[in-house]
Image (tube, helix red, strand yellow):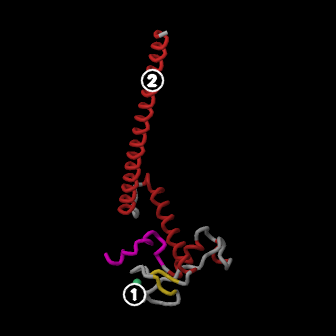
Amino acid sequence: MNDVIEKISKTISETGKVVSEKTKLVGESARLNSRILAKEGVVRSNYSAIGEFYYNKYKDAPDADIADTVNEITEALNAIDEMKAQILSLKGAVKCAECGAECPIENSFCGHCGAKLIKPEPPKEEEPAEEAEQTETEESPEAAEAAEEKPEVLEGEVIDTDKTEE
Ligand SMILES: [Zn+2]
């Protein structure tokens, strides 16, 4: 009788040992996995910082093999700028390109720094309103519109509002 009890209790304690070792392994793996995640976050955010550094330094003359990526960023930033301007104009405001102040859209000059306010383009359709002259090239409608209101600005230096201070 004692023998049987001894056997059973031995089995139980060995099973317990195995279970607790498994638990330990699982716990250790989970800890390592979460440390891996944290390190991967460090890698990603630093990759991103390098990308931003590179972009700001070389956006006007990127290496050929990364030019597409750089240009995609520029296009996206331009689009963001344009949409932000559209939101402002929905609010009846315009942002001063010099100091960033929001000014009433009917003003011609910034009430804070006196800079001339650049009015946003009206939200545009794919097709230009007038036909004939602009049908020659695909990208001319935008370019033509841009030339009217803010020459050069759309070409790549758009976002750099600090530029004039340099
Ligand atoms: Zn201003």
Identify the disc placed on residue 90.
none
Q: Residue at x 36, y 55 (%)?
A: 50
157 in magenta: yes
Q: Residue at x 42, y 27 (%)?
A: 21
Where is mark 2, residue-wise? 18
Which residues are the magenta region? 151-166
123 in magenta: no
| Nearer-N-terminus badge (1/2) | 2
Quarter holding ligand 1:
bottom left
Question: Residue 29's spot in the image, x, y percent?
Answer: 42, 35
Tags 1 and 2 in contact by the CB under 8 Å rule? no
Residue flagged by tag 1: what amino acid is it? His
* CB of mark 1 near ligand 1 (< 8 Å): yes
Choose between 102 and 61: the one closer to the eye.
Answer: 102
Q: Left or right of 49: which side holds 93?
A: right
The chief SS type of the magenta part is loop
Question: Residue 135's spot in the image, x, y percent?
Answer: 65, 72
Measured in 3D between alpha carbons, the distance from the residue under mark 1 to the one under mark 2, in whole angstroms, is: 73 Å
Badge 1 crowding class, 10 Å Cα cut-off, few under 14, some 14 to 19, many 20 or more, is few
Question: Residue 61's spot in the image, x, y percent?
Answer: 39, 61
Where is mark 1, residue-wise? 112
Residue 95 position (above or below residue 78): below
Q: Quadrant of residue 127?
A: bottom right
Choose between 137 and 40: the one closer to the eye.
Answer: 40
Q: Residue at x 55, y 81 (%)?
A: 91
Residue 92 position (above or below residue 157): below
Residue 55 position (above or below residue 101): above
Please tell me whether mark 2 sits on a helix, a strand or a loop: helix
Residue flagged by tag 2: what amino acid is it? Val
Badge 2 crowding class, 10 Å Cα cut-off, few under 14, some 14 to 19, many 20 or more, is few
